[in-house]
Image (spheres, coloured by chain):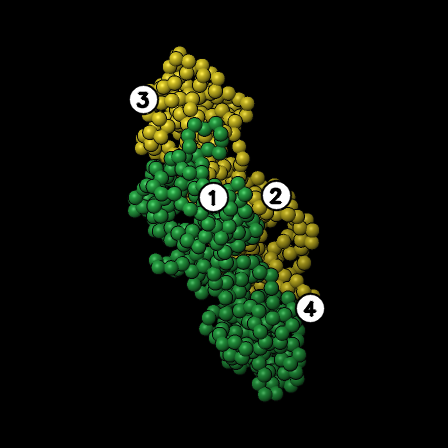
Chain colours: A green, B yellow
Amino acid sequence: MNATLDGDVVRAHGDARQRFYDARGYGRADGADVTLARVEAAHLLYRGDLESVSGMDFRAFFRDSVASEPGFAARFLVYTDLRERGFYLAPAREGWPGSDGAGDDRDDTEDGADILVFERGEKPGGPVAHRVRVVGEREELAATALAGVTLAVVDEESEVSYFGCSAGGGFDGQTAYDLPTGLDADLLDDRVVCWSPPAALYESAFYGQPVSGRDDADVDALQLSLLEAADLAERGAVDLDAAAVVERGREVEGDRFDRRLTVYRELRDAGVVPKTGYKFGADFRTYDAVESVAELPHSERLVRVVTPEHRFHPRDLALDVRLAGGVRKSMVFALAGAESVAYLTVERLTP
Amino acid sequence: MNATLDGDVVRAHGDARQRFYDARGYGRADGADVTLARVEAAHLLYRGDLESVSGMDFRAFFRDSVASEPGFAARFLVYTDLRERGFYLAPAREGWPGSDGAGDDRDDTEDGADILVFERGEKPGGPVAHRVRVVGEREELAATALAGVTLAVVDEESEVSYFGCSAGGGFDGQTAYDLPTGLDADLLDDRVVCWSPPAALYESAFYGQPVSGRDDADVDALQLSLLEAADLAERGAVDLDAAAVVERGREVEGDRFDRRLTVYRELRDAGVVPKTGYKFGADFRTYDAVESVAELPHSERLVRVVTPEHRFHPRDLALDVRLAGGVRKSMVFALAGAESVAYLTVERLTP
């Protein structure tokens, strides 16, 4: 069967509507005919279901489409991959199934989705399982635009990986403790030493790190990070000027210290315990419920603090999410503004 | 016992030489007495083996030392950690054991080592197991200064992690194949499609990725990354202008493309197969010996390409090395200059 290119769509007549639209969910119905997006027509050519589009075979049509639609090659790869996984799907495009307000009131043509994937077993226009945004591995992604989107990242060798992005961090803080007041402490370099603290400050509240885990030490002291010390100073637990600790923090890490402190404080307020995520390349690892350090649970999340203006490089995103998955934690990004923090959870998906 | 601060060293008399130097390997012998570096004296105070240094207890001496020696707090933490692991160690400092040319001819006081760790069971001045460079997690590290060094990174919560850095990538290329000539290919966007290639180009040489792994496709084509295409064009295997492919590569990723191509070409020349490391956040994953894609071995290494001027942020280094370890691969950094490539392998250590 042959079809015809008409502006930015492809039109097919005869039994095309029955074969492609009714039976297999390609395109949109146009009376007795079917209208296809370029990516759909390319897929039908690729499978041999169409022979030509305005005289072009797959190779010629693909080349013409790459020249006509930015990002076409990546979109075709993702469309093909999702079709091969057995889903019905449609371009997120006005007039195509799922994009006309039927079934939900999101305007996907405006929020950055490229392809709508319908729930398994559902026909086009049914409930949407994934709003897929297609990106090349070299494109940067605005952090604020990702909640609710499934990213399909096409790497330089044309393999596709999927990331589900959802708003919120999923924290469920249940850690409770009482803090002491006015503990003796020294601000030394880029850390703080707290002298002769009550054992519960470490054992229950999980602040700091004993100077030694060994019993042969003659010294009873807890080392605090600048974040922990700033937080404890603000809460009156250590006898240090909170502003001086924050100032030291800014000296050693700039504005980043303020953003991290905002997130640290907010998590502590919510009953979550943040500890350094350095070994995982993150800002924090977090514990929802610490009863005691002696019986420390597995930390549930890794948190990376970024600005609200942050743009992800897909390769960095892949690295963070892969590492988190490898240690059975969720990867959470904290978009920390001056006034508030928005959390974004990103996980690998296999649609 | 009390000791005396004298400039930037601490002097102890009486039976100090026997107790500290002869029996436990602290300091350097000074006639009948012993001379200690600040870090050694602090450790002895910390353990209660010294009562005071010029009237200062541990807290006062520690504070004084932090004010006198940049990076003292981190160095003390690492010194303590290594002592607790049961090693003999010495500051890398002229006149201290191991730093005076006895046993080897490296001048550790000049190559950035802070502490020498002697092989397990060896006394100070014996064979060196680790030349330890102590860094805070916020300090950047010049890539060229790391070969042969063991990094001890002190994180913001005062935990120490160790990384062994060695020159070379450890590649052992054994992949052999013949390339075709003049294959038909299109440069499309940021990738290349090679039409009707011989099966061996993918199956044996492991270039590219079939457009579909499925048998229902009507199209016989191999997708190539721009790197693969540039390499194959330079070798005459595909009928594309290599310069045009490189130009496209520079358009989409700038100078980075040239660096990556230099490494790609050098690895292929050495019989190693580099494929994208995107899913691991790296430039390449590499295979030493590919017989066929159908029986693909585990890839042995992840490679990140950097400039020779690159400075590592310890947190990024921790992330890369941890991820590589989690997938049982070595982490290799390729310092790619205009003329040549130097490789650096970094692994986590537990001394």
Mark seen at residue A204: 1
Judged by depth in the image, the label closer to the viewer, 4 or 2, is 4
Disc 3 target residue: B54
The residue tagged 2 is: B173
> What is the distance, in whole Å, between disc 3 and disc 4 at their CAs?
85 Å
At a point 62% along the width and 80% down the height, the residue shown is A21
Q: Is residue B109 above or below residue A306?
A: above
> Residue B319: percent from the left, percent from the top?
50, 47
Q: Find residue B323 and name its label.
A: none
Q: Mark 3 or 4, which is nearer the eye?
A: 3
Residue at screen point 53% across, 22% down? B122
Amino acid type, label 3:
Ser
Give the CA distance from mark 2 to mark 1: 53 Å
- Label 4 close to label 2 by CB (< 8 Å): no
Which chain is disc 4 placed on?
Answer: B
- Name the image quarter holding residue A44: bottom right
- Does label 3 or label 4 sit earlier along the sequence? 3
Tag 2, which secondary structure?
A: loop
Judged by depth in the image, the label closer to the viewer, 2 or 1, is 1
Residue B144 location, x and y as percent? 44, 39
Marked residue nearer the N-terminal end (4 or 2): 2
- Mark 4 Cα-neighbour bin, 10 Å: few <14, some 14–19, many ≥20: few
Residue to which mark 4 is pinned: B216
Callout 1 amino acid: Ser
Q: Residue furthest top?
A: B32
CA distance for labels 1 and 3 = 38 Å
Sequence-wise first label, 2 or 3? 3
- Which dot, 2 or 3, sits closer to the camera? 3
Is A345 located above or below residue B2 in the figure? below
